[in-house]
Image: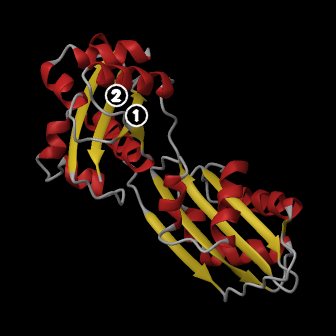
Amino acid sequence: MIKTTVQSTFFGFLIFLTSAISYADEGVVRQVTQRINAMRKAASLPEVRLNADLSALAKKYVSGSKEGKACVFAQENGYKWEACSFSAGSLTSGDPSVVFNTLRTRASALKSPEIDEIGLSVQNMGNHYLVAIFMAKFLPEASFNRQEFLQILNQFRAVHGLNKVAYEPRLDQAAYNWAKKHVEWQMAAEHEARGSTLEKRIEATGYVPMAQAENVGRYITLGAQFVFDGWKESPGHRENMLRSIVTQVGVACIDAPLHNRKDLGQYFCVLVLAKP
């Protein structure tokens, strides 16, 4: 089982020059990625995929004054990771060999079997190069129309005179993490016995809830209305969706194709509701 990890490291000395012209060297990025995959292949590790959106996020993070961990920043921008690491720093040369050798030495996660995607940014800042890399593993969610589900949920709440709720990335992450545990362990009670609670699972994403509730369900199909109706027809789940205090939600559905009881449903869905 792959464990969720967060790592943020900096190499070298960061020098920000407001007068410098910054641009990403795509050629260097491609060459460094090729060298990373050659290194991984030699170590009998699977290749990593260069994610252009994640590369842009690495550039955005390192180029601005961002507070907190880089992996949390990625999470807040919609990335649900199972494993995540980040490294950044400045180099005097943007040569692909120099960039690769520095990353190979300083970014240890590049040698980990836990990652399958990278986001790499190399920027020429005038008299130095600013390098940033995300190394992560993202598992695909099952196809599920999130916006339709939110619309149905808010219509249901409106009928009962309640406020609308909005998606919150950290609650999405909490929902995703717990849905995945259902797939891995089959029964959530096993994890509950190890001390996990909804509040702890939410707080692990950096969100501090004043109030929280959670729905878990197993489904044979992922239509937004179908998933909603399953929870609406269950008194406890219905009550959670009608809690007046909550203002934010997160939802995730995970495909469990190898589960041994497909007659009970192939998909695990989790809805987390909270108020910060």
Q: Residue at x 28, y 39 (%)?
A: 273
Q: Position of residue 259 (x, y in %)?
A: 33, 23
Q: Position of residue 104 (x, y in %)?
A: 66, 72
Q: Residue at x 61, y 61 (%)?
A: 134
Q: Position of residue 224 (x, y in %)?
A: 42, 18
Q: Residues within 10 Å of mark 1 (few under 14, many from 20)?
A: many
Q: Residues within 10 Å of mark 2 (few under 14, many from 20)?
A: many
Query: Is residue 54 something one can see in this rendering?
Result: yes
Residue 269: mark: 2
Q: Residue at x 54, y 56 (%)?
A: 74
Q: Is residue 227 left or right of residue 119?
A: left
Is 3 in front, or is 226? Answer: 226
Here the colouring is secondary structure
Is 87 in front, or is 49? Answer: 87
Q: Is residue 169 above or below residue 165?
A: below
Numbered-mark total: 2
Residue 7: mark: none
* Quadrant of the image occupied by residue 248: top left
Q: Is residue 132 above or below residue 37?
A: below
Q: Secondary structure at mark 1?
A: strand
**Amino acid tagged 2:** Cys
Q: Is residue 258 left or right of residue 157?
A: right
Q: Is residue 69 above or below residue 233?
A: below
Q: Which residue is mark 1?
A: 252
Looking at the rendering, in which quadrant would you find the C terminus?
bottom left
Q: Secondary structure at mark 2?
A: strand
CA separation in Å, label 1 and label 2: 6 Å
